[in-house]
Image: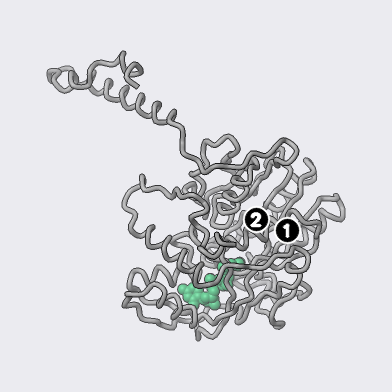
């Protein structure tokens, strides 16, 4: 480094300059700062080690929403597997922080792009995940949510058609609405209020599925549809507003745990690494009908409140019941027999293990006091013990 700075004055001389030379001191300082920045950018980053794939096996993969919660975990897995990964994200709910461990890596590209506008790029596969997914986020801007799921999906299917890429559409358990069939198999058509507060998302995703099959039939696009059930894990946004992150953050901060309504409504939660496995298995399969991806272990929201409070431990949080959410689905649990049969997939991470990892993540996030404490960890660190032993 020494010779790189040779043509600068000794820094100490700047401090002893007379008052009148302040200006030149400042410019020298700026010069020095520029040099340091330049030097820092040359220090090789310590990336997690990725597999090497030959030209034949290496795929160029676009992930829309790749800087989001689920997307960033998918990025980690596909990067480690040795693929070339492009992320398109408009950072509405995604964050650079979720993928910064890969920025600068030769196999990685981060595009600040809103998929409501077309994207011209050469890829083999598209994982189309972009959309706000938390109820408070999608209800905050319902028009944008509908545009993302309709125009955004048309753009991604159009891209698939133009370059011959496979397109996996991230759909949701919300296509079943407030279900009258329990558990929900893929053959169930759902019970959705088309004009309620959740309609922007539920109907947006239903159109996205319809678009997928229309493009498949009319334009021969190779389409996969994943109906994703409730998912949790590290990298959920602090302001996500969904139940797992809310209850964890409330317990960690000794705040009141907020149950909306009676708490007798049920959900079935899967850990994010299980979902990532399922998404990749579905993309690589030849199966074109919708597939539920979720963990069938079902609990009431009230049970989650007490379970999470106990796991966090050492907290004074009280549990309080607030008004129910309008159109809140009363029960939800995936029938995963299709995924088990056609993908040989089933979730493997026990709820308690996944929750512990998520609690640990939020605990660290709350203690973070500077930007330099970055969100960089080896992706394997995120997997629960039981997953590593698999
Ligand atoms: O997490 C997900 O994967 C799903 O989250 C939402 O669906 P929802 O099941 O309503 O998710 P939450 O907002 O986490 O709510 C779950 C239940 O907890 C309740 N809740 C939520 C937050 C809270 O602080 N307290 C509380 O009781 C809700 O009323 C609801 O009954 C999205 O709409 C789905 O698309 C998405 O797939």
Q: Which residue is drawn at 50% across and 86% down?
A: 262
Q: Which residue is drawn at 49% across and 78% down?
A: 304
Instruction: Answer above or below: position of 212 versus 323.
Output: above
Mark 2 crowdedness (10 Å alpha carbons): few <14, some 14-19, many ≥20: some
**In terms of image quarters, where does ligand 1 lie?**
bottom right
Instruction: Answer above or below: position of 268 versus 112.
Output: below
Which quadrant of the rendered structure holds the C terminus?
bottom right
Precedes in sequence: disc 2 or disc 1 = 2
- The answer to whether residue 199 of the structure is visible from this angle is no
Q: Which residue is drawn at 49% across and 70% down?
A: 244
Residue position marked by numbered label 2 in the rendering: 147
Q: Which residue lies furthest to the top in this view?
A: 7
For marks 2 and 1, give the one nearer the viewer: 1
Which quadrant of the rendered structure holds the N terminus?
top left
**In which quarter of the view is residue 118 placed?**
top right
Residue position marked by numbered label 1 in the rendering: 282
* Front in this rendered view, residue 74 or 213: 74
Instruction: Answer above or below: position of 50 versus 303.
Output: above
Q: Residue at x 67, y 66 (%)?
A: 293
Residue 322 horizontal/vertical position (percent):
44, 81
- The answer to whether residue 324 of the structure is visible from this angle is yes
* Front in this rendered view, residue 80 or 162: 80
Residue 96 horizontal/vertical position (percent):
49, 46
Cα gap from disc 2 to disc 1, whole angstroms = 26 Å
Residue 74 horizontal/vertical position (percent):
60, 53
User: Is residue 266 shown left or right of residue 368?
Assistant: right
User: Is residue 312 shown left or right of residue 243?
Assistant: left
Residue 152 horizontal/vertical position (percent):
67, 51
Mark 1 crowdedness (10 Å alpha carbons): few <14, some 14-19, many ≥20: many
């Amino acid at each position: 480094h020494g010779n790189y700075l040779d043509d600068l004055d000794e820094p100490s001389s700047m401090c002893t300059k007379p008052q009148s030379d302040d200006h030149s001191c400042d410019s020298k300082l700026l010069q020095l700062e520029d040099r340091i920045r330049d030097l820092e950018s040359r220090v090789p980053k310590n990336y997690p080690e990725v597999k090497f794939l030959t030209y034949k096996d290496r795929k160029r993969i676009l992930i829309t929403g790749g800087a989001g919660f689920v997307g960033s975990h998918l990025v980690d897995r596909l990067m480690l597997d040795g693929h070339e990964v492009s992320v398109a994200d408009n950072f509405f709910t995604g964050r650079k922080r979720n993928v910064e461990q890969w920025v600068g890596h030769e196999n990685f590209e981060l595009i600040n792009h809103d998929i409501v506008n077309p994207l011209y790029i050469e890829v083999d596969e598209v994982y189309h995940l972009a959309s706000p997914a938390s109820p408070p986020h999608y209800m905050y801007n319902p028009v944008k949510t509908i545009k993302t799921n309709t125009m955004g999906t048309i753009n991604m299917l159009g891209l698939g058609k133009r370059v011959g890429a496979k397109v996996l559409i991230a759909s949701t358990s919300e296509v079943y609405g407030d279900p009258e069939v329990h558990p929900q198999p893929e053959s169930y058509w759902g019970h959705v209020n088309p004009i309620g507060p959740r309609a922007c998302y539920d109907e947006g995703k239903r159109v996205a599925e319809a678009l997928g099959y229309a493009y498949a039939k009319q334009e021969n696009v190779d389409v996969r549809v994943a109906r994703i059930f409730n998912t949790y894990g590290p990298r959920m946004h602090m302001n996500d507003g969904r139940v797992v992150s809310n209850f964890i953050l409330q317990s960690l901060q000794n705040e009141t745990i907020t149950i909306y309504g009676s708490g007798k409504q049920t959900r079935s939660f899967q850990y994010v690494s299980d979902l990532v496995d399922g998404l990749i298995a579905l993309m690589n399969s030849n199966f074109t009908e919708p597939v539920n991806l979720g963990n069938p272990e079902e609990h009431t929201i009230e049970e989650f409140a007490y379970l999470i409070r106990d796991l966090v431990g050492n907290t004074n949080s009280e549990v309080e019941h607030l008004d129910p959410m309008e159109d809140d689905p009363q029960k939800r649990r995936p029938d995963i027999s299709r995924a088990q049969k056609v993908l040989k997939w089933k979730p493997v991470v026990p709820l308690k293990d996944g929750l512990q990892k998520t609690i640990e993540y939020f605990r660290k996030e709350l203690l973070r006091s500077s930007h330099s404490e970055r969100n960089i960890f080896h992706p394997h660190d995120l997997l629960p013990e039981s997953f590593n032993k698999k």
